[in-house]
Image: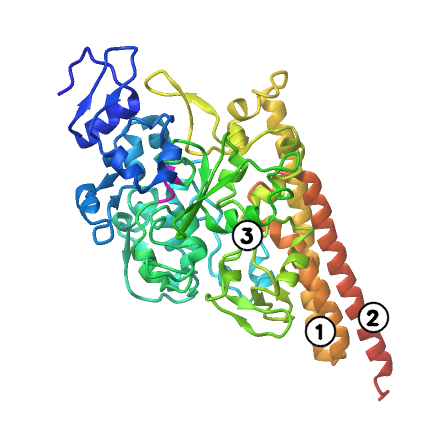
């Protein structure tokens, strides 16, 4: 046992308490901790990339055994005996308790099970405008990160609603491991969809980091790939994303692990949305041709949050050019465009991919995910150098009296003092809250108008089709639907109601309204001509 008069760093103290590692020697207060005979040197014989990350870092003195089990067997026969890697956030929580506890604290400010397609939701006309897509069965507004896996599985569009809370509706506040909270009924419920795929789950969890090859390609070393059975992958998913998604466990450097993000940055290292002065602070490290990680010298939470808070494609779909299916063996089913609402229609056309056809017009439509990062890029706050964590993860004083960044991820609108007044000290909470309201109310107004005109376009299309308007005219109107949809639906998926970039929101949504009106006019003009050409009775 360690004596009370010996001081250790918080990290080593937590590691000792957790694993009771032998062969540790601890120096007196004020001197560095020495760790002897911990096997690091032998690990470095093969893992030089780990040595480069670990040595000289805050975790340098931690034994490899803190996070890896069965190392003795592995060292005796590396190929036959693979080590067990512990990536559960609870391990990090032994030393970083305030951060860990704040991550799993229930945020009661976030609406629980609130569908976007309700009158007070983000997209009241969702069922009509997304007709033919599984999201019309249930598309909820987001809750906190602690629920990200549970909420993905316990939704009516995911695998027929077969996964339900063990304790009924009381389970909605449970933040434990997925399969302590949910149960598999094995039954498809009525009015549900069979959506879900293995790639989508990679955003929500860190559980598969060592079971998933870069980009989800098939590999004998990988347990899962893009074409894996989604229920099997779900059953192997127990935790929401962990600390290792954003913090390198070897050297504590800020990092990213999401493969499609790394690929997108590597494709355009100088011109991607994170680049400053033609460069991106991201060093990509290849782990034996299996995984890649991207390590940063300084925290860039824009990029760290972009592992999930982006528009990305993880679905099978169809080619624009010839209508042929795009299946999960195609790399396009794991793709980050890193483009905003004004650029995405052209991007997906050039990628030769769309998600689904509208049930009434047959328009080829994209279903967007949560594009906060691309929306924020180039905004006033982005140009000022503000990063995501400064507004959404402000510093708080923990129970131990020390300051830490909250990992619960707040909604700044409800915490204006912590999120805004650090940069705007001359303003009051009431003033900043009023300004936020002004932006969001204005943008939501444009969203409702865009929805109205999209609805008019759909209704007018149906009327024109019944009247027998020519296929060429219907094709022209359908193209306007495709344009208007992208410029609108992006904002139902983006979660700031325009606050991340009000100028982009206005340009995009008014563009949607204009495109819908143009489509309505094309159809009305054709119907007027058709009526004139009708034989008189």
Q: Is residue 202 left or right of residue 453?
A: left
Q: Which residue is mark 1?
A: 463
Part of the protein shown in magenta? 240-244
The answer to whether residue 393 is magenta is no
Who's the residue at 36% across and 39% down the image? Answer: 48
Q: Which residue is mark 2?
A: 525
Q: Quadrant of residue 68?
A: top left
Category of crowding for the residue at label 2, using alpha-carbon neighbours closer than 10 angstroms: few (below 14), some (14–19), many (at least 20)? few
Which quadrant is the C terminus positioned in?
Answer: bottom right
> So how many labels did they put on this image?
3
Q: Earlier in the sequence, mark 1 or mark 3?
A: 3
Q: Which residue is mark 3?
A: 336
Q: Is residue 62 left or right of residue 405?
A: left
Who's the residue at 53% across and 57% down the image? Answer: 313
The numbered dot on residue 271 is none
User: How far apart are the alpha carbons under marks 3 and 2?
Assistant: 40 Å
The x, y position of residue 293, in whole percent, is 44, 43
Residue 154, visible in the rendered structure: no
The x, y position of residue 509, in whole percent, is 70, 49
Q: Quadrant of residue 439?
A: top right
The one nearer the camera, 455 or 289, is 289
The answer to whether residue 243 is magenta is yes
Q: Secondary structure at mark 3?
A: loop
Q: How was the colour assigned to the protein in this rendering?
A: rainbow
The x, y position of residue 442, in whole percent, is 68, 40
Examine the rendered structure and indicate whether residue 426 appears above or below residue 336. Answer: above
Who's the residue at 29% across and 54% down the image? Answer: 236
């Amino acid at each position: 046992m360690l004596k009370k008069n010996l001081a250790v760093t918080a990290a080593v103290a937590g590691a000792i308490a957790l694993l009771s590692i032998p062969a540790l020697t601890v120096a007196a207060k004020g001197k560095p901790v020495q760790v002897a005979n911990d096997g690091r040197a032998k690990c470095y014989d093969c893992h030089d990339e780990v040595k480069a990350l670990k040595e000289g870092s805050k975790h340098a003195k931690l034994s490899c055994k803190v996070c890896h089990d069965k190392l003795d067997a592995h060292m005796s026969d590396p190929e036959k005996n693979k080590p067990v890697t512990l990536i559960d956030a609870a391990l990090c929580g032994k030393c970083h308790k305030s951060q860990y506890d704040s991550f799993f604290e229930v945020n009661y400010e976030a609406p629980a099970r609130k569908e976007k397609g309700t009158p007070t939701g983000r997209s009241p006309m969702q069922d009509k405008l997304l007709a033919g897509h599984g999201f019309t069965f249930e598309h909820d507004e987001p809750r906190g990160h602690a629920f990200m896996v549970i909420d993905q599985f316990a939704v009516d569009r995911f695998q027929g609603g077969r996964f339900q809370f063990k304790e009924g509706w009381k389970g909605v506040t449970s933040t434990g491991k997925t399969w302590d909270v949910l149960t598999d009924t094995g039954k498809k419920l009525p009015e549900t969809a069979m959506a879900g795929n293995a790639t989508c789950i990679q955003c929500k969890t860190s559980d598969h980091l060592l079971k998933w090859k870069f980009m989800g390609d098939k590999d004998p070393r990988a347990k899962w790939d893009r074409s894996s059975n989604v229920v099997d992958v779900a059953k192997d998913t127990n935790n929401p994303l962990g600390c290792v998604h954003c913090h390198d466990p070897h050297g504590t450097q800020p990092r990213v692990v999401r493969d499609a993000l790394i690929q997108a940055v590597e494709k355009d290292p100088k011109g991607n949305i994170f680049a400053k002065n033609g460069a991106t602070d991201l060093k990509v490290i290849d782990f034996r041709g299996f995984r890649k990680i991207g390590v940063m010298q300084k925290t860039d939470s824009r990029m760290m949050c972009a592992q999930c808070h982006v528009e990305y494609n993880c679905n099978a779909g169809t080619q624009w050019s010839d209508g042929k299916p795009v299946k999960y063996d195609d790399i396009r089913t794991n793709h980050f465009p890193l483009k905003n609402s004004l650029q995405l229609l052209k991007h997906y056309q050039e990628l030769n991919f769309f998600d689904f056809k509208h049930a009434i017009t047959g328009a080829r439509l994209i279903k967007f995910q949560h594009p906060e990062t691309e929306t924020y890029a180039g905004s006033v706050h982005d140009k000022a150098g503000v990063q995501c964590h400064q507004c959404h993860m402000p510093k708080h004083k923990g129970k131990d009296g020390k300051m830490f960044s909250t990992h619960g991820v707040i909604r700044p609108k409800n915490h204006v003092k912590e999120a805004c007044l650090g940069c705007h000290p001359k303003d009051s909470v009431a003033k900043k809250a009023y300004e936020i309201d002004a932006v969001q109310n204005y943008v939501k107004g444009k969203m409702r108008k865009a929805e109205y005109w999209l609805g008019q376009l759909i209704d007018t299309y149906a009327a024109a089709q019944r009247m027998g308007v020519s296929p060429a005219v219907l094709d022209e109107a359908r193209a306007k639907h495709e344009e208007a949809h992208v410029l609108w639906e992006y904002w139902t998926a983006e979660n700031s109601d325009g606050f991340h970039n009000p100028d982009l929101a206005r340009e995009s949504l008014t563009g949607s309204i204009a495109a819908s009106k143009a489509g309505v006019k094309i159809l009305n003009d054709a119907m007027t001509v058709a009526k004139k050409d009708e034989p008189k009775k």
